[in-house]
Image (cartoon, rainbow, N blue to C red):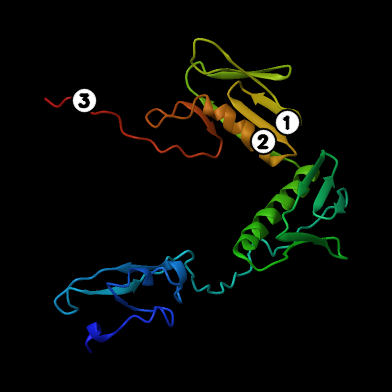
Amino acid sequence: MNLGSFVCGCSVSRCNWILVESHTNCWAMASPLGPSIQSSNLRSPFLGGANGICVPKVAISRVGFMRKTVECKESRIGKQPIPVPSNVTLTMEGQNLSVKGPLGQLAITYPREVKVDREDSGILRVKKVVETRRANQMHGLFRTLTDNMVVGVSKGFEKKLQLIGVGYRATVEGKDIVLNLGFSHPVRMTIPDGLVVKVEENTRITVSGYNKSDIGQFAAAIRKWRPPEPYKGKGVKYADEIVRRKEGKAGKKK
């Protein structure tokens, strides 16, 4: 096909593809692709030196992707029931849950992806409202948080630490815990409300309370002052923590 034989019909109809170089106003006419069409004057031995071609170039504003439905499996932790002792009182208002027991009171607000139901037998179940990936993540998380609240206000939690090192000791003075960890000054930390700290044999610390999150955070703050080092094991470590030891630098061989 000889493209040079085509004549632009811009005076009669809209110019779609072929453009004669002499009709320069053809590209300004409305085209099926609108203003996204740009003209380029291609000079090649096949098209002839005096012929131009309108090259349609569409600006992509949105990129579409095919969505594949993802089936979220039921969380093994989230589907487990939560037993409620007789000495625990529950108050449910919409997405809010309040738990009150002999040790204290805690409250939590659930996201819109999950809800909590209380069955006739007295147990609690956390259920998903929608089938999404985030709902599957929130399902197991908030089931664990709810169980920690119920256990915390009824039985409580505790975290034990141990001081290892020459001269390392701890004492409780009123609302503060004082640590001697080899610094030039003692470390004094204020005990948060709702927590009880006990020291045994000057080197064993027990942090207890009804809020598991606060217990873990305060115990981690104590350990942060002197984490156990891997060569001699000196420092503050959890009672059940295993410190991986390293071999010291070997002496010079003769």
Number of the label disc, if any, that sits on residue 215: 2
Residue type at numbered disc 1: Leu
**What residue would you read off at disc 1?**
195
> 223 or 139, which is in the foreground?
139
User: Circle 1 sits in a helix, a strand or a loop, which is it?
Assistant: strand
> Which element is circle 2 on?
helix
Report the mark closest to the observer, 1 or 3. Answer: 1
Q: Quadrant of residue 121?
A: bottom right
Amino acid at pointer 3: Gly
Evaluate if marks 3 and 2 touch, with contact meaning CB atoms under 8 Å apart: no
Asked whether the beta carbons under mark 1 and mark 3 sit within 8 Å of each other, the answer is no
Q: Which residue is tagged 3? A: 251
Q: Is residue 249 left or right of residue 97?
A: left
Of residue 183 and residue 240, the one placed in the foreground of this image is 183
Alpha carbons under labels 1 and 2: distance apart: 7 Å
Task: Identify which residue is drawn at 58% across, 73% down.
Answer: 71
| Residue 99 on image: x %, y % | 83, 47
- Vertical relation: 248 (above or below) 122: above
The residue at the point 67 percent across, 35 percent down is 215
Mark 3 closeness class: few <14, some 14–19, many ≥20 residues within 10 Å: few
The mark nearer the N terminus, 3 or 2, is: 2
Closer to the camera in the image, 188 or 126: 126
